Image (cartoon, rainbow, N blue to C red):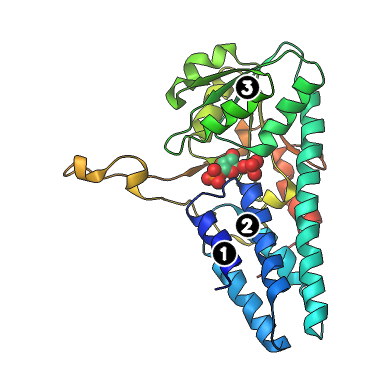
Amino acid sequence: MHAKVEEIGEGIRAMKIRGAGRIARAAAEAFKAYAEDFDGSVDEFRSGLKEVEEYLLSTRPTAVSLRNAVYYVIRRATGNTVEEIRENVIRSANEFVQNSYEAVKRIGEFGAERIRDGSTILTHCNSSAALAPIIQAHRSGKRIKVFNTETRPWLQGHITSRTLAKEGIDVTMIVDSAVRYFMRDIDIVIVGADTIASNGAVINKIGTSQIALAAHEARVPFLVAAETYKFSPETVIGKLVEIEERPAEEIADPRDFPGVKFRNPVFDATPPEYIDAIITERGLISPYLAYQIIKEVMQFGVES
Ligand code: RI2
């Protein structure tokens, strides 16, 4: 495998590169690096791109953003000469990355409108899309407080806390199991998404559905921030979203627990009835409009 492609792929697999948006952009960058360096015939180029596609798709199974990025580039990798194909791959990879940053920015602007001055926000894990409205609200002068979960077992919440503190936002980190305890102090929950199914269910970091349940019980609005490439065309034709299970070693050293089994699913599904709105770059929508978004934005159907 091409060195840069492998560096990106292994980085995604080992979660050195993580976050549904980031891994999607990294996949686009991998194609770009491959295309820039390619030297050979048109047929070799096409089969090489196919190999890169399959390799990238094998790295992590849950976030559809990765597959949508891969298909975005592959679908546009047309041409009769190596130069044409190269140009198209590079252009579409750049386009995907640029659109992705632009989408997060717009989500920040739209989502910030939903954050009232003086409110306390809860977020989970580390989502650029979820942090964008929070940071935007703060920058626009709203006095806000944020509670964020540490997010076992990878502790991505540490990144969130540090990012927000650096912005000068009043941030409090709590353990994942303290969410319901603090829910009475929360005005709005904003989380990200790895995949949104056609029925409006949101697949996000493990623990998200428990937070949604606690928010529902306390009548606290629960919002999801997600670019439209987090919506899954595959679910329209009945495919289930695969929930990634990672090694037990990420939780504890199994050798210290003889006779004990471990399970480590890293995502869960929150049903649409617990979601007040999804903030996309096209505006705020009901989760029940997921199918519509898939139809309009993803050019309906599975593209593999
Ligand atoms: P952005 C992450 O997955 C989290 O589940 C986060 O909520 C989601 O991706 C979206 O992140 P992981 O890669 O795209 O940490 O909003 O397993 O940054």
When asked about the image quadrant of residue 34, the answer is bottom right
Q: Are marks 2 and 1 in contact (CB under 8 Å)?
A: yes
Q: Position of residue 84 (x, y in %)?
A: 83, 79
Residue 80, compared with residue 112, is above or below; it is below
Examine the rendering and report whether any part of residue 203 can be seen: no
Mark 3 and ligand 1: say if the CB distance to the nearest ligand atom is below 8 Å.
Answer: no
Q: Which mark is residue 57?
A: 1
Label located before the other in sequence (2 or 1): 1
Element at label 3? helix
Q: Residues within 10 Å of mark 3 (few under 14, many from 20)?
A: some
Element at label 2? helix
Residue placed most toward the observer, 111 or 168: 168
Label 2, on which residue?
66
- Determine the CA span between mark 1 and mark 3: 35 Å
Which kind of residue does numbered mark 1 sit on? Leu
Label located before the other in sequence (1 or 3): 1
Q: Which mark is residue 303?
A: none
Label 3, on which residue?
165
- Determine the CA span between mark 3 and mark 2: 29 Å
Question: Which quadrant does ligand 1 occupy?
Answer: top right
Mark 2 and ligand 1: say if the CB distance to the nearest ligand atom is below 8 Å.
Answer: no
Which kind of residue does numbered mark 2 sit on? Leu
Q: What residue is at 81 percent from the left and 58 percent from the top?
A: 95
Q: Residues within 10 Å of mark 1 (few under 14, many from 20)?
A: some
Q: Residues within 10 Å of mark 2 (few under 14, many from 20)?
A: many
Residue 61, compared with residue 148, is above or below; it is below
